[in-house]
Amino acid sequence: SKPSIVLVPGAWHVPAHFSQVIEKLEDQGYVCVGVNLPTNTRNPLVDGRLLGIEDDVAAIRAAVISQLDAGNDVVVVTHSYSSVPGTAALTGLNLQARKIAGNTNRVVGVVIISGFILPP
């Protein structure tokens, strides 16, 4: 079966920026999920706390895990800033780690568009 595709826009972008890509992928039978980054807001204060990269990591991880929990493999597509929280969100979701937890599906790929690759 085809993997689900989780699309994560860069800073100050929203999933709608991927709408044409999502439409083409869905026409080919892919399940696509766009992630709204919590830090993409005009009011970054929540309960007196400034939203940060950890909030973006959590949102991305939740989107990926929702697809894994549905039994799908996942490809994550990141753009610009989101490559940083996007790759951080994938810790422990590879085949080896998932097998230890008794799962057979996993993150099968990461696409980084105009982004950053940081050392662990």
Image: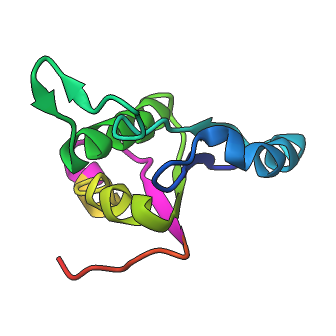
In this rendering, would 4 be left or right of 87?
A: right
Residue at the spot 58% in from the left edge and 41% down from the top edge? 14
Height in image: 53 above or below 16? below
Which one is in front, 43 or 98? 43
Residue at the farthest front position: 42
Magenta highlight on residue 93: no
Residue 113 percent location from the top left of the image: 57, 72
In this rendering, would 35 be left or right of 33?
A: left
Residue at the farthest top position: 47
Which one is in front, 100 or 64? 64
Residue 20 percent location from the top left of the image: 83, 48
- Quadrant position of the C terminus in the picture: bottom left
Residue 52 percent location from the top left of the image: 21, 44
Which region is colored magenta? 98-112
In this rendering, would 119 be left or right of 36?
A: left
Residue at the farthest left position: 48
Q: Residue 46, located in which quarter of the rendered image?
A: top left
Height in image: 118 above or below 75? below
The chosen color scheme is: rainbow
Magenta highlight on residue 104: yes
The answer to whether residue 1 is visible is no
Which one is in front, 54 or 105? 54
Q: Residue 87, located in which quarter of the rendered image?
A: bottom left
Which one is in front, 34 or 28? 34
Residue at the spot 32% in from the left edge and 28% down from the top edge? 43
Residue at the spot 34% in from the left edge and 40% down from the top edge? 39
Residue 104 percent location from the top left of the image: 41, 47
